Each structure stands twice: as structure tokens, then as C-alpha cells.
Amino acid sequence: MSPPLLEVHNLSKVFRLEDREIPALLEVSFAVSAGECLAIVGESGAGKSTVANLILGVYPPSSGDILMHGAPLPPRRGREHRRAIQLVQQNPLSSLNPKRTVGASLRLALDVHRIGERHERPEIVATLLEEVGLPAEFARRYPAALSGGQRQRVAVARALTCRSELVVLDEPTSSLDVLVQARVLRLLEELRPRRGLTYLFITHDLSVVRNFADRVAVFEKGRLIEIGVTEALFAAPRHPYTRRLISAVPVVTREEEAMRDALAEGEFRQ
């Protein structure tokens, strides 16, 4: 049996500020199978972004291990590891160079990772844009000329340039209005099986992951307190903190409203 795509074992991160130590993550363990979408949820300061940054190699863990395909990821990531794990940020304006056209930003990733022959890369850029629902002519536009949803599609296209296996989605729809948010999520859902992608979805919004993620991992104050299949976790959360988060999710149907009221009243017990 092959190992999970990603494994995290007893992962901890302590930041040092002058003479103080600030624990941001405390002995977290979980695994993500190939093709799965695991959502990491929790309030601000729960440790969600710390997990993402450790997996991306932004900074090293204080202790613990991160494995991909059963092999440890080194603290200093080489080109192969950076290519295998890509990030889609919350605000694409912070990740897209405003002085570069969309096409230039996508071509830069192709150049750095030496994907395709040089003469083939303009065509690859056009294909990537069409794959995320944008006309090929957008390659000539600058980020400022695009809407928020269009910029996020470009950010997704850039993650696809490297033919990565794992995509870390850090609040990818929180800055978008509801309609655009739904379209971007639908795009991500379509790309996952087509491209054979695995998602790590970081968010504070449980209403987003309810119909998007396969499993949900709930974080509180740097600890992983509950993890499970999305439908089961929403139907019968075990931890009081999870129940509180779910009870605050906006409801649509009478069944959801009844479940929310039951959670708020403490009907589900540990």
C-alpha cells in the first residue's frame, strides 16, 4: 500500500521574540491522501497559516517531520519540492507583480522550472488561461486591469504551471463576493480530478468547506482538536469548540437550522 501524499508527524513551531517563546503549533499530526481535499479550519491564531507555511517551507519546524510520498521534506526546499507544492494566496494582488503582464508572470514560472521548450511557452500560457476560464488574450493584460475573480483565476493558473501535486489554498475566496466565490470554488472542483491535484484548504469559514472538502481538520490555539469526514463532522462534532464553530455557520435549509440549534444547545456531547 502506497503512503499518503503528505504526512505531518508531531509538528511543532515556536517563534522566539526577544526573550519570549511563542508557541504557534503544538505536536500536530495528520495525513492527506492523493486526490483529497483536506480543509484546515479555525479562528484567527489557531495555527492554520503556520501549518501551511511549514509545509511550503517558508520556515523550518521547531520539531516534528513533514513527509511527501513517504520521504522527509528538507528544511531548505530544492526546485523539485517547490515545484511539487504550490500556493494560491488570499489576495492575488500580493502575489502577482503589478509591473508584469499576466502572460509574463505565467511564463516566469515556466522559465524557472524549465517547463516546455522556450518557443512552446506562449502556447502553454494561452492553454493555462483557457483552462481556468480566461481568454488567451488576457496574457497581455496587467493585474490591475482584472477583477478580483479574474486575478484569482490567474493565481490558480500560475499554480498549475508547475504541474504540482499539492496545492495549498490559503483563504483563496475570502476576498471575493459570494457569486465570484462560488465560481472559483467550482473551478477548483473541476481542476482537482482533471489535473490529479490534492488540496490543503486553509480557511476560517466552515460554510465554504461544507460542500467542498472531503475532510475537515479543526485547529484551536495551535492544536489539532478534531479531524473527520466533512459530512460526519458537521452532523456530529465531538469537541465543544467545533460545535461552536458549526453553530455559527449561516444556514440555508430547515434541517441545517435544526442542527445548528441542537449544537448551540449542547445536544451533541463528547
Image (spheres, rainbow, N blue to C red):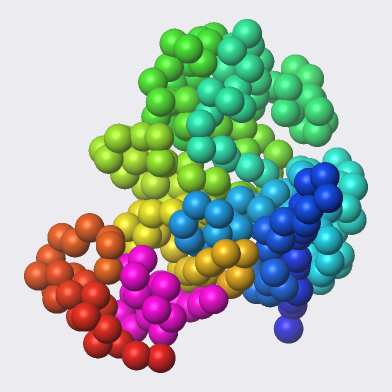
Q: Assess whether residue 179 is covered by the magenta stretch.
A: no
- Total labels drawn: 0
* Residue 231 appears in the rendering: no
164 lies above or below 137: below
Q: Assess whether residue 231 is covered by the magenta stretch.
A: yes
At 41% from the left and 73% from the top, the residue drawn is: 242
| Residue occupying the far left of the picture | 254
At 31% from the left and 44% from the top, the residue drawn is: 182
Q: Which residues are magenta?
A: 225-246
Which quarter of the rendered picture does the N terminus lie within?
A: bottom right
65 lies above or below 100: below
Residue situated in front as seen by the camera: 187 or 236: 236
| Residue occupying the far bottom of the picture | 270
Point out residue 251 in the picture as x, y percentages from the top left corner: 19, 61
Image quarter of residue 270: bottom left
Q: Is residue 8 left or right of residue 208?
A: right
At 26% from the left and 38% from the top, the residue drawn is: 179
Point out residue 106 in the picture as x, y percentages from the top left corner: 65, 24
30 lies above or below 136: below
Residue situated in front as seen by the camera: 135 or 172: 172
Residue situated in front as seen by the camera: 66 or 17: 17
* Residue 76 appears in the rendering: yes
Image quarter of residue 122: top right
Residue situated in front as seen by the camera: 65 or 219: 219
At 82% from the left and 69% from the top, the residue drawn is: 64
Point out residue 166 in the picture as x, y percentages from the top left corner: 65, 54
Point out residue 91 in the picture as x, y percentages from the top left corner: 51, 31
